[in-house]
Image (tube, rainbow, N blue to C red):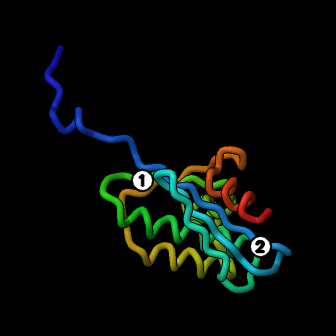
């Protein structure tokens, strides 16, 4: 068996950061949640906007937290349209283009994006429970 480098043995899995945003009614007052390491950060005083605006703000907040973490992070959200725009799979137009510019302005970092189902999104679950 070939020798294994010490760095390979000490490599940690990426930190999972869950994000979700929403507003009620839509458009209306926006709120976001970001969850990592068992803690949920909820911000509900983001002013008026749409559900897409709120999802973008949640992704941007998640990226800010990710850039402050050592090592690789994966951002997990259920807003496929936002994730596709952030990954340049589809064009971001209108306000989405402004959000994408703010996301990009945070700079590069060891961050990946991944779409997950609503039922797996811990930030979305926390936000829904908080609304009750």
Q: Where residue 65 sits in the image (x, y, percent)? A: 44, 66
Q: Quadrant of the C terminus?
A: bottom right
Q: Would you identify the image quadrant in which residue 27 lies?
A: bottom right
Which residue is identified by label 2? 23
- The reply, left or right, for residue 121 in relation to residue 24 is left
Q: Would you identify the image quadrant in which residue 124 lies?
A: bottom right
111 vs 95: above or below = above
Dot 1: what SS?
strand
Q: Residue furthest right?
A: 25
Q: Quadrant of the N terminus?
A: top left
Question: Which circle's residue, 1 or 2, is located before the other in the chain?
Answer: 2
Estimate how packed mark 1 is, as few (under 14), some (14 to 19) or many (20 or more) residues with alpha carbons within 10 Å.
Answer: many
Which residue is identified by label 1? 73
- The reply, left or right, for residue 110 in relation to residue 36 is left
120 vs 60: above or below = above
Q: Residue at x 66, y 68 (%)?
A: 55
- Count of marks placed on residues: 2
Asked whether 25 or 78 is in front, the reply is 25
Q: Would you identify the image quadrant in which residue 128 lies?
A: bottom right
């Amino acid at each position: 068996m070939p020798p294994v480098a010490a760095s390979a043995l000490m490599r940690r899995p990426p930190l999972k950061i869950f994000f979700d945003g929403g507003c009620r009614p839509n458009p209306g007052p926006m709120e976001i949640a970001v969850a990592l390491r068992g803690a949920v950060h909820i911000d509900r005083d983001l002013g008026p906007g749409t559900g897409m605006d709120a999802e973008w703000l949640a992704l941007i907040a998640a990226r800010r937290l990710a850039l402050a973490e050592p090592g690789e992070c994966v951002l997990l959200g259920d807003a496929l349209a936002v994730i596709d725009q952030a990954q340049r799979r589809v064009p971001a137009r209108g306000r989405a283009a402004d959000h994408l510019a703010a996301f990009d302005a945070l700079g590069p970092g060891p961050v990946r994006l991944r779409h997950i189902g609503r039922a797996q999104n811990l930030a979305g679950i926390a936000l829904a429970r908080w609304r009750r």
